[in-house]
Amino acid sequence: MVKPAEPPLSSAILLGHLRRQGVTAEAVDANLEALLWLLDSARLKAAAGGRPPTALRRAVAHAPRALALLRSSRATESFARYRTAAEDLNRALSAWGTSDERLTLGDYRHGRLSPFAPGDLEKLAAGAERTLFRPYFEQQLLPRVVGMRPRRIGLSINYRHQALPAFELAGLLRRALPDVELIAGGGLVSCWAGVLAQRGETPGPFDRLVSGPGEACLAAAASQSPPVGSLLADAGQVSFEPDYSFADIPAYLSPEPVLQVSASRGCYWSRCRFCPEAATPTHPYRAFPPRQVPALLRRLATANGVRRFHFTDNALPPATLHALAGAPEDLAGLAWHGFARFEPLLADRALVEALARCGCRMLQLGLESGSQKILDGLGKGTDLAIAERVLHHLHAAGIATYVYVLLGTPEETRPDAEATRAFLEEHAEKIDFLNLALMNLPREADFPGALPGAEWEEEPLGLYRRSTDGGWDRSAARRYLSGDLQGSAAIRAILRRTPPWFTSNHAPFFAGPGRL
């Protein structure tokens, strides 16, 4: 499960590439389909049982109305009404929960089974265990896929909470279609590549795993001379032109349709010491020609009848920002948002004003810390003085800011955390939305204080390692986050503006004067 706000770019990119290579291919967003299947009124009532708690009973009754509101521009007319609808849907999904399983909008967790334990993944693939998605798989998805009579099936597994149901689905596909080649790829599979290569195994029922971009590997698999080997590292051809013809765009939960698009793969900076892109890069940096990006948005807008876009880049390249700022005709009537670094170019008021005129509605910015010492140690390349000017110019131009902060970084002390709080409070009026989190240290990180990964004995596919440094450990950072940071009136006011569950996906709809 991922937040069902937008069609998935990865599937659209792969579909477009295969079709341009002359391959007959189809795509299915099983994430959206499963969510809507589970939110069906009759199924919700049956899952809730005969005498559900009052709050659950009301949420189930309100679910159809909540779905309709979140798909309508009416959702932006009242943040309170929007919040109620999102919370009703989330509570309604809890009807499917068990003592072991917990399902929310965009997240799924199992109390007994771990996505990082190969044995647990094998149990699901073999049918020895099951998830709450099994009825959807068996009653809707599996018959549909079997009816397509495919020769190969690829599953995109990007996040930890997709792994368990994905392996269950793969096992069902293997038993129903024993002669079909099964391929797995996506962000999570790419993160596992190094460990799997060391272990010399392909988990579950998959014939092949793809690490990195999938275009070249899938195209080769569809040819008469498929690639050799079960673990394929694909650093070859990439595409930037998605095909969204598979997506039922109005069915996504968004006040207005939004399409994902990317102007680059990998990260042009790639020096942040806490980032998996820097520790184990699976996507070598490549960029779509910047001057062609505005025309790409216009083509997608015309082909799909949309006007809003979400750039999924790790960070929009400076050259792309310049190109977007200089294309008022191509971008007329369009709106977009995405991640950017606190680059000096965004401290240029004229450029920021041009970005606003050319459709920029929000930028997501990784501040991480208000301590220059910590930023330098993290390899962020961020100057706090420049960050202050960037926030000032974006606010003045009417571009919303969604700022990300990480506590519990290696070498952080309480004074560093207090500097972060002071920075946020000082600039609170220029920060529209805020994400506060604890750092997850990548498995391959080389920070001082990184502890040996004893936990990997039980979860060999684990992605992160524990760290401690100077008495300011993860527990202390967590207490500071929940107490001092969230206890600040200025910071708490920003946090209250964050759209529940959909967070940055829906934040642009509530940006601007009078929208909150």
Image (tube, rainbow, N blue to C red):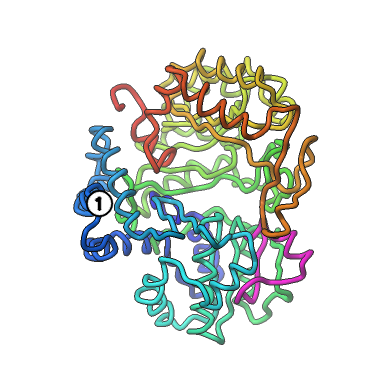
Q: Position of residue 445 (x, y in %)?
A: 75, 43
Depicted 34 relative to depicted 204: above or below: above
Q: Is residue 199 magenta?
A: yes
10 Å crowding of disc 1: few (<14), some (14-19), many (20+): few
| Side (left or right) of 107 relative to 206 | left
- Determine which quarter of the picture holds residue 180: bottom right
Is 209 inside the magenta-drawn segment? yes
Q: Residue 268's spot in the image, x, y percent?
A: 67, 39
In the displayed structure, 415 sits above or below 476; it is above
* Residue that carries the numbered disc 1 in the rendered image: 53
Tell me the quadrant of the picture where the N terminus can be found: bottom left
Q: Quadrant of residue 243?
A: bottom left
Q: Is residue 198 left or right of residue 115?
A: right
Residue at 50% across, 42% down? 311
> Is residue 505 at all visible to an observer of this figure?
yes
Residue positioned 40% across, 60% down in the render: 98
Q: Please state which of residues 273 and 285 is positioned toward the viewer in this rendering.
A: 273
- Does 195 sit left or right of 362 as displayed? right
Please provide the residue range marked out in magenta: 189-211
Q: Quadrant of residue 199?
A: bottom right
Residue 353 visible here: no
Question: Can you give x and y, in whole percent of width and height, for residue 128 in the image?
Answer: 52, 76
x, y percentage for residue 446?
Answer: 79, 41
Residue type at numbered disc 1: Pro
Image position of 408 with respect to 305: above or below? above
